[in-house]
Amino acid sequence: MTEPVDGIRAFHNAFRSDLERIDTAAFNSAKGKEGLDDTIGRFLFFNEILVWHAHGEEAAVFPALETVAPLVAEAYVIDHHGLDSAFEELSTSYSARDPLKTARATAAFRFHLNIHLDKEDTHLYRIFRERISLPDQSKALGIMASMIPQERFAEVVVWLYPLIGHDDRENMTRIWQMMMPAPVFAGVKELIRKAIGSDWAELTRRIPTL
Ligand SMILES: [Fe+2]
C-alpha cells in the first residue's frame, strides 16, 4: 500500500537526479564544453522547489516529529541552512560567469544534498513512519503540498515526473488521486501524461483506474 512517506521519497529522488544532471553539466562546462547554460541555469528552479519542500518539512514534519522524538529534527534544520548556503555559493558563482567556481559549487551542493536526503530517508522519515499515526502523516503531507504556490503546481508536476522512476511515479500518482478532488486530479493527470510521453502506458498498467 502507498504511504504518505512514499511521496516524500519521490521528491527526494527527483532532487537527487536533477542536481546530478546540473552538476554533470557544470563539470563539462568547466572543461570547455559549450551549450550547457540552460541545464546549469535550471538550478534556480530546482532550488525554488527544494525551498518549498524544506519549508514544508519545517512547518509540518519536524514539529510532528518533535512530539515523538524530541531534538532529532534540530540537526536537519541545520542541514537545511547548509543547503541555503550551498545555493548562495552556486548563485554567486553562476552570476559571476565563473565556470570553475560554478562547478565546484554544484559539486558541493550535490554532496551535501545527497547526504542530507539519505539521512532523512533512512533515519528521520523512519522515525516519522514508525511513530506517527497514518492520519497525522497524511496531514503533514497535506501541509507540505500547500507550500507549493497553486499557480506553480503545474510546473512542479512537469519537473517531477521525468526525473523519477516507475515506482515513484506510481506512488505519487496514487497519493494525488487519493488527496485531490476529482476535477483537480483530472488536470494533473493530463500534465503527467504529457510529461512522461510513452511511459504513460506503464503508469496506466500499474494504476488501471487512470
Ligand atoms: Fe530536508
Image (cartoon, helix red, strand yellow):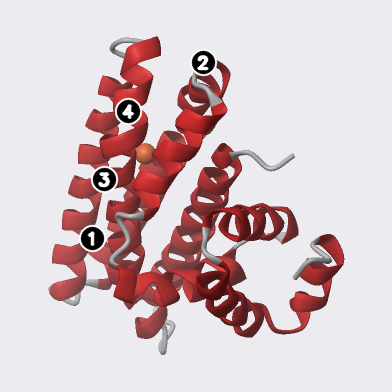
Q: Is mark 1 within 8 Å of ligand 1?
A: no
Amino acid type, label 3: His
State whether residue 104 appears in this view. Answer: no
Quadrant in the rendering for residue 192: bottom right
Q: Is mark 2 within 8 Å of ligand 1?
A: no
**Frontmost residue, 124 versus 145:** 145
Q: Is mark 4 within 8 Å of ligand 1?
A: no
Question: Dot 3 corresponds to which residue?
Answer: 55
Question: Dot 1 corresponds to which residue?
Answer: 90
Question: Dot 4 corresponds to which residue?
Answer: 62
Question: Dot 2 corresponds to which residue?
Answer: 131
- Residue 191, percent from left and from top: 56, 80
Quadrant in the rendering for residue 61: top left
State whether residue 13 appears in this view. Answer: yes
Q: Gap between marks 4 and 1, in whole Å?
A: 27 Å
The quarter of the picture where the C terminus appears is bottom right
